Image (cartoon, rainbow, N blue to C red):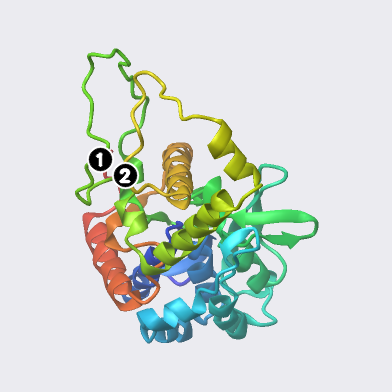
Amino acid sequence: MTGRTRVAIALGSGGARGYAHIGVLEVLEERGYEVVSVAGTSMGALVGGLYAAGRLDDYAAWARGLTQRDVLRLLDPAFRGPGAIRATKIFAKVTELVSGVRIEDLPIAFTAVATDLLAGKEVWFQRGPLATAIRASIALPSFITPVMVDGRLLADGGLLNPIPVAATAAATADLTIAVSLSEEHLRGAGTSVVDTAPEGPRTDPGEDDGSAPFAWVRDNERFRAITEWFNNAREDLAAAPGTLAAEDDRDQPAAEIPDVEHPPAGLRTLEVMQLSVDALQAAMTRYRLASYPPDLLITLPRTACRALDFHRAGEMIELGRERAAAALDRGPGLPWG
């Protein structure tokens, strides 16, 4: 018995905002807390796994040195694969740091959460190679290529469990902390009722002042490059004589559906996919936290950093430190409680 406050911590998903987890863990150590259990989803699994293995400082130093140009080179596209990004070049650094490390040998209990796409079930990695568990947990569908492990097609754990507090339930801890990288997901629970009467209020589908809900997705260089490639490919297919797409355009006149507005101008296919995943994660976040409420919740706004801004490690680490310090000063208790 050390006499220190023992902490179990659940690190949520959120792309590059996950660098903030590093700052949270730094503050906990500086204040004398003893982390006895870590569970992570997606980027939370990556940071949590490296922390449990004692290699997080090395990773943080490497990440702080990345420029935007470096990140663009590391995000290798996979246009013919089941994900837009392979991310093998970025993940090579993680593999280098934890090569040969097994989860059951870690000095801190660790769980990486992934999703079995074929079975539609949550998968917890608590044994086996650490690198494999992290790689499975970060595979966000439509973006990062999923992986096959023991016959299971595994993808991002954030689909079913964005903040895996339940995975820390077995820990002997004095305090359970959860870190949400999308505090907006904690708001707006419930169902909206829409009046479809023709005289109801309308919005102008042609207006886009940058505040549209998909603006944060579109405003990313790599994302723009990916979506541009997909849309150019679609246009080439549609223009090719004799193709199904060309015949559809020729033989099927456009039809207007009464009282249904056009989507906002400029909305792309991958943006719709990302917004769909985000809506799912928002609902799952509220459900999971209601089922397994932590003692202390640390949150970051989704607008703090775009999902693929992996060159902003320094900023996100510092923000994580600030949010962790504020939450610890506030003490146990959830913001909405």
Residue at image coords 37%, 18%: 258
| Residue 336 seen by the camera | yes
- Seen in the picture, residue 278 relative to 92 is either above or below; the reply is above
Instruction: Tell me what residue is drawn at x 49 percent, y 50 percent.
Output: 165
Quadrant of the rendered image containing residue 86: bottom right
Residue 45 in picture, x, y percent from top left = 53, 64
Instruction: Look at mark 1 in the image and give the residue it sits on.
Output: 206
Query: Mark 2 falls on what kind of element?
Result: loop
Tag 1 and tag 2, C-beta contact below 8 Å: yes
Q: Estimate the x, y position of residue 248 in percent, counting from the top left.
A: 58, 37
Q: Measuring from the top left, give residue 293's x and y in whole percent.
A: 42, 43
* Local secondary structure at mark 1: loop
Residue 282 lies, with reference to residue 38, above or below; the image says: above
- Amino acid at dot 2: Ala
Above or below 73: residue 144: above
Q: Which mark is residue 265?
A: 2
Q: How many marks?
A: 2
Which residue is nearer to you in this view: 275 or 299? 275
* Residue at x-position 34% and y-position 24%: 192
Check disc 1 and give the amino acid type. Gly
Residue 4 visible in this rendered orientation of the protein: no
Q: Residue at x 67, y 42 (%)?
A: 120
